[in-house]
Image (cartoon, rainbow, N blue to C red):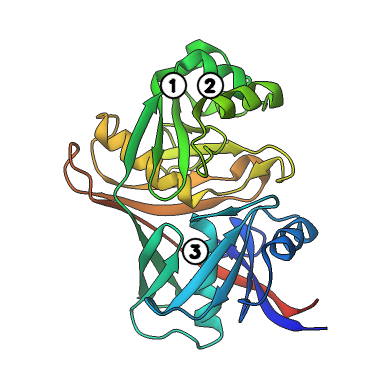
Amino acid sequence: MTEHEFDWVDAFTDRPFGGNGCAVFHQAGAIDAGTCMAIVRETSLTECTYLEPSAVADFRVRYFLADREIPFAGHPTIATVASLLERGMASGDSLTLETLAGVIGVEILAQPGAMPQIVMTQIAPEFREAVPPAEVAAVSGIEVDDIVGTPQIVTSGLPYCVTVVRSAGVLGRMRLDLAAMKDFSARYDRPGDPVMEPYLVALEGATPAGRTFARHLMAPPSPAEDPFTGSAAGPAAAYLWRHGMIECPRFVAEQGHLMGRPGHAQIEVLGPREAITGVRVGGQGRVLMQGRIRL
């Protein structure tokens, strides 16, 4: 039997039971992929991360869903750094993480009287196929007229079909159609690089502080909904900036309020609309539980 220490962290929030939870496992290089996925299923979380030494960055981090490893994820990155800070394994104002999507730079911004702001710089976005609104409407259980503009698959480490909807009320009507999602995946997945479920964004906040409000429904074996999707917030911000749907590249993105798990991120798109170089996505992480797993 082997043991590994872990922290359960709520990311993109400063309060317990807000934002999105992630379990961060330390010294986890010996845990095989099948076990990593089984742990995710055991926790009923969307994702878990597994840390090990790196030759090219401060740490190497692996990201797992319930059924596969993915190259990068947003809220688990915030959670991972919050865990490292809690354990005194990181200090100073920056660190680097080796991921399958490349080396990610992370800034740690001290805030008097509050938990630090953890800011990742996601890689320059890749703008892929445009998707007919009718296909996204079929997957998401909404009407074609609910969609503004043309959805597009965008990635800054993990590909999403970014879709703008005409109001936050549309988000409350979303219902994931699994058969339509299967057809969507067959059409847009690339070998070894499957597209995540559509990420729907309204250009209004859930609170007065927000500029956008989003929702991300997921297919089994993942939980039915992701409370806050940091890896989608970056591509969504890049899409909005590139297509002139926002006037300022800095804003607050909100998600999770319809689940009773409100979360928010500070977003900054880097570079001009026609030549985006990256997206800064920042939030706080609160360690909720600590323990050991016995395998």
Quadrant where the N terminus sits is: bottom right
Q: Nearer the viewer, residue 61 or 30?
A: 30
Q: Judge depth for marks 1 and 2 and give the one in front.
A: 1
User: CA separation, marks 3 and 1?
Assistant: 29 Å
Marks 2,3: beta carbons within 8 A:
no
Percent x, y of residue 13: 54, 60
Residue 216 shows in this picture: yes
Above or below, 171 against 34 in this view is above
Instruction: Point out the residue furthest to the bottom here.
Output: 88
SS of the residue under disc 1: loop
Marks 1,2: beta carbons within 8 A:
yes
Residue occupied by mark 2: 136
SS of the residue under disc 2: helix
Q: Earlier in the sequence, mark 2 or mark 3?
A: 3
Residue occupied by mark 3: 77
User: CA separation, marks 1 and 2?
Assistant: 7 Å
Q: Is residue 144 left or right of residue 40?
A: left
